[in-house]
Amino acid sequence: MTESEHALEAATHDVELYNVEINDDTLVAPVDGRIQYRIANVGEVLPAGGHVFAMLDTSYVYMDIYLPTDAAGKVRYGADARIVVDAYPKVAIPAKVLFIATQAQFTPKTVETQTERDKLMFRIRVRIDTDWLRGRTDAVSSGLPGVAYVLTDAATKWPASLQGTVTPQGTATPQGTATQ
């Protein structure tokens, strides 16, 4: 091998080493989303698995609502829902019921009378449709207050103001605060 071939081989090896170091030093998010704020500052030493940024997962946006016993008992898993956040009061965002609590979240000290049982509240989670979110992720914010409507009767239709981008049927039960 000539001296120039050795120099080329050494330079190629250096390039490969630099590429490995760049890949090792590159931050990769576990999901698609948007950075909310920085946790660690430039130059800080972090432990393994340390967090650098707080990130909003824009593919999983939901609202937790709390319904009294009589309304919660009518809600079914997978039922159509609509979310209307205060920031966009004329937009009915299509969603589905993702979770229904099996136990009351707010229970009075004793549940002996009908009026005390009426105070029981069950947590329901409605998740925004991921197809609807595509192309709208810049508008997603965490913690926005609003109202969620859940279908409880398939015999009635959504009012015109809650039609959203799909046309499901049923009556609506309002409640809620948006959460991410």
Image (tube, rainbow, N blue to C red):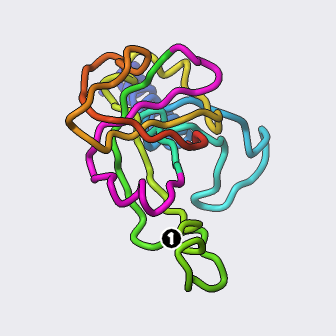
Q: Is disc 1 surrounded by few (<14), some (14 to 19) or many (20+) residues within 10 Å? A: some
User: In this picture, which residue range is highlighted in magenta?
Assistant: 66-90
Q: Which residue is painted at 37% across and 56% down in the image?
A: 99
Quarter in which the C terminus is drawn: top right
Q: Which residue is painted at 56% across and 80% down in the image?
A: 113
14 left or right, relative to 42 = left
Q: Which residue is painted at 54% across and 43% down in the image?
A: 175
Q: Which residue is painted at 35% across and 18% down in the image?
A: 163
Closer to us: 41 or 22: 41
Quarter in which the N terminus is drawn: top left
Closer to us: 178 or 169: 169
1 left or right, relative to 149 = left
Q: Is residue 28 visible?
A: no
- Quadrant of the image occupied by residue 178: top right
Which amino acid, mark 1? Ala
Q: Is residue 63 visible?
A: yes
Magenta-colored stretch includes residue 69: yes
Q: Is residue 63 above or below residue 9?
A: below
- Quadrant of the image occupied by residue 102: bottom left
Q: Position of residue 44 (x, y in %)?
A: 78, 48
Q: Position of residue 108 (x, y in %)?
A: 64, 77
Tag 1 residue: 104
Q: Position of residue 27 (x, y in %)?
A: 54, 39
Q: Is residue 65 above or below residue 156?
A: below
Q: Secondary structure at mark 1?
A: loop
Closer to us: 15 or 103: 103
